[in-house]
Amino acid sequence: MTMRKEILYHGATIKKAYFEGWYYKITTNTISLAIILGVTKNTEDDHAFIQTLDTLSQKEQYIRYSISEMTIEDTPFHIQLGDNHFYEDKIIMHVDKDIKIDVEVTMEDMTPLNSSRYAPTIMGPFAYLPNMQCIHSICSLYHKVNGIININKQNITTKGAIGYIEKDRGTSFPKKYLWIQSNHSTIYNKACFFLSVATIPYSIFHFTGVIAILLINNKQHRFTTYYGARVESLEYTEKGHYHITIKQREYKVVVKVNPGNPIQLLAPKKGIMVTEIMESLDARIAVNLYKEDQLIEVFYFRQSGCEIRGYN
């Protein structure tokens, strides 16, 4: 496997308040499981953590570890938190605070994001700017997952299971953002949809940034601020759904989101995990793709991750 530098730890030499977190998502035909591991350092509450969310228990749990219990290696990539081990292609996790979760899985056929000198990461040319509040990375848009998952003593079959890996680092999440992600298309075997809309502060300015990735089979479609995309509208409907319209040159993407059943998680503020956010893993998405106002196709996704803050 070719190592993707996006997954590596970037915070070893940073002296200011800082967080860095990895997000592993696994979906099977019956459940979705999100595993977030991370570290907050140079704050009043330095610690490492594992945070989980799943659609079987419909609960989250946050497990703290001292910094001394965390080890990080680059080659091969490996994070150890207590007796739990996280690699680029493998997870061995046994946690039991509020929910007992045992995971021993391998991941294969990773799908990295296409990159170029102009857009080396999902951040595009913004990846070259220093002092961004939050730097986002996508490590694998889609991969296969095989092994053992047990939640509260219930075995979950991993036949056909799909994985996704992303990460964030910096000081704080944006005050206003929408994030959705899914690998479960109702038609295509290999698919991923990712969307992030956020109000981004930089220096004395603020701007609204958008990133959308549509992976269908092996083709990646990208609609982003740095390729000329703009959010034409973001509406909150009476039914509690969201409609987002994105325009990029001759293309238009209309995304309709049913947010599902969100559960409270913790996110960083000035490096400290104190911000309460809501995330669901059972959202439903319809992605309408137009070219020169002609509808090309509608892509339907289920078992989607969804976080929305400040847009309702």
Image (cartoon, rainbow, N blue to C red):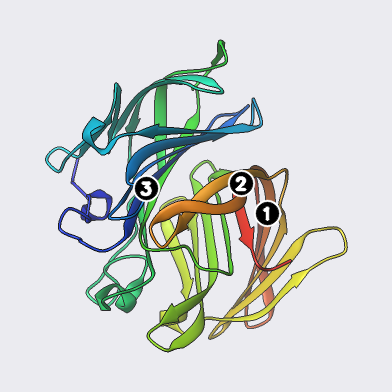
Figure quadrant of residue 256: bottom right
CA gap between label 1 and label 2 equals: 7 Å
Measured as percent of width and height from the top left, residue 197 is found at 55, 70
Residue found 52% across the figure and 47% down from its top: 266
Asked whether the beta carbons under mark 1 and mark 3 sit within 8 Å of each other, the answer is no
Q: Earlier in the sequence, mark 1 or mark 2?
A: 1
> Sequence-wise, which precedes: disc 1 or disc 3?
3
Determine the residue located farthest toward the top in the rendered image: 153
Residue at the image point whose x is 65% and y is 63% from the top: 297
Label 1–label 2 contact, CB within 8 A: yes
Query: Which residue is farthest left?
Result: 75
CA gap between label 2 and label 3 equals: 32 Å
Residue 249 spot, x, y in % from top left = 53, 86
- Secondary structure at numbered mark 3: loop
Question: Is residue 154 shown left or right of residue 215?
Answer: right
Answer with mark 2 or mark 3, whichever residue precedes in sequence: 3
Give the amino acid type for the residue marked by disc 3 in the picture.
Answer: Asp
Residue marked by disc 1? 285
Q: Is residue 104 left or right of residue 216?
A: left
Q: Position of residue 103 (x, y in %)?
A: 42, 21
Q: Nearer the viewer, residue 10 or 209?
A: 10
List the residue tagged with mark 2.
304
Q: CA distance from mark 1 to mark 3?
A: 37 Å
At mark 2, the secondary structure is strand
From the top left corner, tell me how far across and down residue 96 is, in percent. 48, 19
* Label 3 CA crowd tier, 10 Å (few <14, some 14–19, many 20+): few
Q: Amino acid at mark 1?
A: Ile
Q: Residue at x 22, y 34 (%)?
A: 68
Amino acid on which the number 2 mark rests in the picture:
Ser
**Residue placed under numbered mark 3 in the picture:** 45
